[in-house]
């Protein structure tokens, strides 16, 4: 069992930056691909970043490419999401998720373990 806890969310003005962290306990994150998702009120959960377990492969949708960067520190059992040039449409609850290593996927249903989420609010 993997327990995931996100932190680092908050209120920021448009154009600002935030760095989210996802700390794992219960099991090492080695051999787990990690994903970041977000969900705004009334919308479906959306993939925003993924990183494979060694950390050499990342994946982003066009909506955040060039603004968001996912990274991981397997020694610290932590995954990060650096978010720059934030926009009001980035406002959502952000979740990290883990799945056993395989093909890096953007589908929420492929991830087995989920955190509780952290709120990110971007004001205009």
Image (cartoon, rainbow, N blue to C red):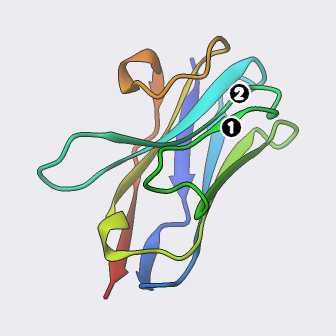
- Given the current orientation, which residue lies at the most extreme left position? 42
- Given the current orientation, which residue lies at the most extreme front position? 62
Q: Quadrant of residue 114?
A: top left
Residue 31 x/y as whole percent: 75, 17
Q: Residue at x 61, y 61 (%)?
A: 66
Q: Quadrant of the N terminus?
A: top right
In the rendered structure, the answer to whether residue 44 lies left or right of residue 76 reads: left
Q: Is residue 37 above or below residue 92?
A: above
Q: Quadrant of the C terminus?
A: bottom left
In the rendered structure, the answer to whether residue 38 lies left or right of residue 20 reads: left
Q: Secondary structure at mark 2?
A: loop
Q: Residue at x 71, y 27 (%)?
A: 52
In the rendered structure, the answer to whether residue 53 lies left or right of residue 7 reads: right
Task: Report, in whole angstroms, how far the alpha carbon at label 2 lies from the one at label 1.
Answer: 7 Å
Q: Residues within 10 Å of mark 2 (few under 14, many from 20)?
A: many
Residue 48 x/y as whole percent: 47, 46
Give the foreground label among 2 and 1.
1
| First-in-chain label (2 vs 1) | 2
Q: Which mark is residue 52?
A: 2
Answer yes or no: do the residues labelled 2 and 1 have beta carbons within 8 Å? yes
Q: Which mark is residue 111?
A: none
Q: Quadrant of residue 87?
A: bottom left
Give the residue at mark 1. 58
Q: Residue at x 82, y 36 (%)?
A: 74
Residue 120 x/y as whole percent: 39, 67
């Amino acid at each position: 069992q993997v327990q995931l806890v996100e932190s680092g969310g908050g209120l920021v003005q448009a154009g600002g930056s935030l760095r989210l962290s996802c700390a794992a306990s219960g099991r090492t994150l080695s051999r787990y691909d990690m994903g970041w998702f977000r969900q705004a009120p009334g919308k479906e959960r959306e993939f925003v970043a993924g990183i494979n377990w060694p950390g050499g492969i990342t994946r982003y949708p066009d909506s955040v490419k060039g603004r968001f960067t996912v990274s991981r520190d397997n020694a610290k059992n932590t995954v990060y999401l650096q978010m720059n040039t934030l926009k009001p449409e980035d406002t959502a609850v952000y979740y990290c998720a883990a799945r056993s290593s395989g093909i890096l996927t953007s589908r929420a249903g492929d991830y087995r373990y989920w955190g509780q989420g952290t709120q990110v609010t971007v004001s205009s």
